């Protein structure tokens, strides 16, 4: 199953109806919460079984939730039921921090199952409640899958923008004989902050994907958010006061930027994963051994490092890689990555973790790229054993960048959130221009004419002085 997010081109009326559906879905969720609270207060057991919830829904009758189709409403109830049972399971296994669904949300995504939507080119028809006309929306790009493979579409909002998530069943890629990935060829993947993926492959080949653009985006967004919070804090409504229109605008702007940041980072992480899979397919690597650092991330490591780890979103990163690998017919094995960046791949002895990017062994003199050394050590922990030869490693490194669409990655597009260069307070961005002439010699103020007479300058005019002529 693959999912792509597609934007929508909507008329104001369509937009209103779409938001109506999202609100109705939020209402269904809130009703389930309210009903169960009411039941608990009266000593009745909560209704959490999906079939029973559906029965309650149908007691409410048609039209109770605006234009929302009853199948879509059932989808919301299924989500509620699944969340409830997942929590129950976690609590049973001794996790006391797991909490049952309790939070109401105004808008909730609406999923349209198979046969409750139909494509007509870039237009999409969505089923609504009985008696309501169907809702037609226009997508802003063609769906990247064949229409007959699409299994469901989900209407959702991010900030104030509406999107359609299209989920399709895509068959695993097929290759010509002898060209497909070979499960015996193993590569080790070391996820990192600076390099989202460093891959050590067979034959001493390596791939390093740079994520500096992603990190810069996170930094700038954090700084921007802090600044905005400080400015907004003084203008917020006092307790008991309603927010002003200006306040609402601030909030909307903040949500918009938050959504944009999330989109940008997500896009870059998908690009990074795609690069790795492309590289692996080219080299017929059939097994990717991925180091999973999530076991050690819960440790407290100070606020700076915690922030770094939070921005990293390594779970999402690994999930991207897994999805794309599965699609390409490559197996992914997760292993514990503890100690892989401080072990020598040649003599297998422990050395102090390097502070820079170069790994050097004190015992045998081996030296190589730190993250690729990690990748090679991770590959050893998976099936297939070590991949490195005792000779030079890595032999070839391919460098790729993730997030080339981000502002500020090229000299032509400086990120507006970044402070100006040293030396120019609000100076121009781009190529250097000739320095302005020294003061007093500006051509604009000289005012000499052909007949040799001087004209009154602006300063003279302001002072009211007259020049006889
Ligand atoms: Zn060594």
Image (tube, rainbow, N blue to C red):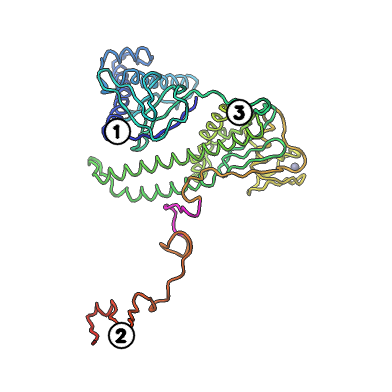
Q: Nearer the viewer, residue 247 or 119?
A: 119
Q: In the current view of this chain or complex, which residue is farthest to the bottom?
A: 468
Q: Nearer the viewer, mark 2 or mark 1?
A: 2
- Residue 332's mark? 3
Of tags 3 and 2, which is closer to the observer?
A: 2
* Location of mark 2 (residue): 453
At label 2, counting other C-alpha atoms closer than 10 Å, the crowd grade (few under 14, some 14-19, many 20 or more) is few
Magenta part of the chain: 410-420
Residue topped by disc 1: 15
CB at mark 2 closer than 8 A to ligand 1?
Answer: no
Quadrant of the snapshot with the C terminus = bottom left
Q: Callout 1: helix, strand or loop?
A: helix
Q: Where is residue 374 in the image (x, y as percent from the top left)?
A: 65, 39
Mark 2 or mark 1: whose residue is earlier in sequence:
1
Is 98 or 292 nearer to us in this picture?
A: 292
Q: In which quarter of the image is residue 111?
A: top left
């Amino acid at each position: 199953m693959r999912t792509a997010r597609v934007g929508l081109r909507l008329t104001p009326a369509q937009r209103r109806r779409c938001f109506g559906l999202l609100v109705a879905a939020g209402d269904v969720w809130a009703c389930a919460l309210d009903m169960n609270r009411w039941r608990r207060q009266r000593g009745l057991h909560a209704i959490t079984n999906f079939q029973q919830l559906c029965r309650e829904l149908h007691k409410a009758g048609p039209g109770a939730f605006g234009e929302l189709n009853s199948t879509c409403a059932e989808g919301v109830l299924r989500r509620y039921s699944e969340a409830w049972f997942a929590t129950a399971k976690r609590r049973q296994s001794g996790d006391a921090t797991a909490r049952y669904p309790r939070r109401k949300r105004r808008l909730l995504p609406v999923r349209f199952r198979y046969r409750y939507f139909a494509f007509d080119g870039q237009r999409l028809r969505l089923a609504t409640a009985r008696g309501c006309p169907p809702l037609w929306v226009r997508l802003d790009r063609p769906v990247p899958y064949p229409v007959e493979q699409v299994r469901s579409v989900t209407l959702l909002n991010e900030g104030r923008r509406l999107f359609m998530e299209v989920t399709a069943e895509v068959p695993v890629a097929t290759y010509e004989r002898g060209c497909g990935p070979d499960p015996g060829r193993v590569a080790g993947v070391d996820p990192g902050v600076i390099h989202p993926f460093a891959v050590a492959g067979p034959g001493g080949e390596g791939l390093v994907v740079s994520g500096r653009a992603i990190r810069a985006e996170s930094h700038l967004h954090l700084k921007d958010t802090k600044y905005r919070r400080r400015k907004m804090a003084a203008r917020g409504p006092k307790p008991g006061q309603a927010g002003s229109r200006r306040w609402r605008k601030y909030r909307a702007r903040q949500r918009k930027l938050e959504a944009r940041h999330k989109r940008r980072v997500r896009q870059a992480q998908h690009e990074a994963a795609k690069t790795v899979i492309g590289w692996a397919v080219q080299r017929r690597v059939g097994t990717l051994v991925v180091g999973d650092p999530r076991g050690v991330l819960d440790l407290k490591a100070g606020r700076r490092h915690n922030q770094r780890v939070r921005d990293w979103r390594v779970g999402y990163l690994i999930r991207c890689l897994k999805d794309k690998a599965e699609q390409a017919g490559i197996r992914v094995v997760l292993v514990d990555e503890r100690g892989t960046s401080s072990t020598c791949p040649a003599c297998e002895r422990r050395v102090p973790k390097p502070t820079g990017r170069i790994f050097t062994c004190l015992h045998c003199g081996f030296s190589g790229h730190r993250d690729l050394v990690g990748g090679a050590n991770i590959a050893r922990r998976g099936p297939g054993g070590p991949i490195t030869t005792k000779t030079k490693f890595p032999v070839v490194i391919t460098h790729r960048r993730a997030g080339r669409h981000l502002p500020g990655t090229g000299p032509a597009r400086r990120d507006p959130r970044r402070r100006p260069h040293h030396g120019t307070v609000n100076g121009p961005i781009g190529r250097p221009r000739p320095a302005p002439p020294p003061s007093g010699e500006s051509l604009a103020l000289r005012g000499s004419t052909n007949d040799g007479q001087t004209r009154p300058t602006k300063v003279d005019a302001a002072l009211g002085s007259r020049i006889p002529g």
